[in-house]
Amino acid sequence: MSQLDPRGLPEGYPFNADWEITPREFQQRRTAGERLLLVDVRTAAERSTACIAGSIHVPLNEVESRADELREHEDQLIVMQCHHGVRSLRAAASLRRLGFDRVVSLAGGIHLWSMDVDPAVPIY
């Protein structure tokens, strides 16, 4: 397992606090009772391999067309999640362009989630 820093990020990870939340911080905030929406933007096949409990599925290619479904959650932080964090950053940018103010990407995606928060979630 890679060495993780105190935030739960691999050494050298280019974390951008304006655009991302670490899996560790997400879990801490969720455990503390904060209402957060986790949106999995991976494919259905990826989701069947590994999934973070409590997430909803909106594949990346449907994010813009299904944005209205997410409007009811604008009062909470919307966290986009994929495998490693690249597609979820694109999804977050798409929603921001559509006027969503409180949307970020899960840094390192489900891969880092599995490494740092929940090792029961398979790494693939």
Image (cartoon, helix red, strand yellow):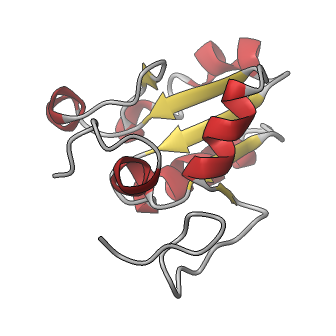
Front residue of this view, candidates 25 and 16: 25
Q: Position of residue 65 (x, y in %)?
A: 50, 27
Which residue is at 27% across, 36% downward? Answer: 120
What is the tally of numbered marks visible in this picture?
A: 0
Front residue of this view, candidates 116 and 22: 116
Which residue is at 20% across, 42% downward? Answer: 122
Please tell me in which quadrant of the rendered image residue 59 appears: top left
The residue positioned farthest toward the bottom in the image shown: 12
Residue 15 is left or right of residue 10, and the answer is right
Which residue is at 47% across, 43% downward? Answer: 81
Quadrant of the rendering where the N terminus is positioned: bottom left
Please tell me in which quadrant of the rendered image residue 7 appears: bottom right
Residue 115 is left or right of residue 17, and the answer is left
Q: Position of residue 13 (x, y in %)?
A: 53, 80
Residue 37 is left or right of residue 101, and the answer is left
Q: Position of residue 85 (x, y in %)?
A: 45, 59
Q: Where is 27 relative to 73, above or below?
A: below
Q: Position of residue 115 (x, y in %)?
A: 36, 56
Q: Where is 24 relative to 48, above or below?
A: below
Residue 89 is left or right of residue 58, and the answer is right
Which residue is at 68% across, 33% downward? Answer: 78
Please tell me in which quadrant of the rendered image residue 116 appears: bottom left
Front residue of this view, candidates 116 and 77: 116
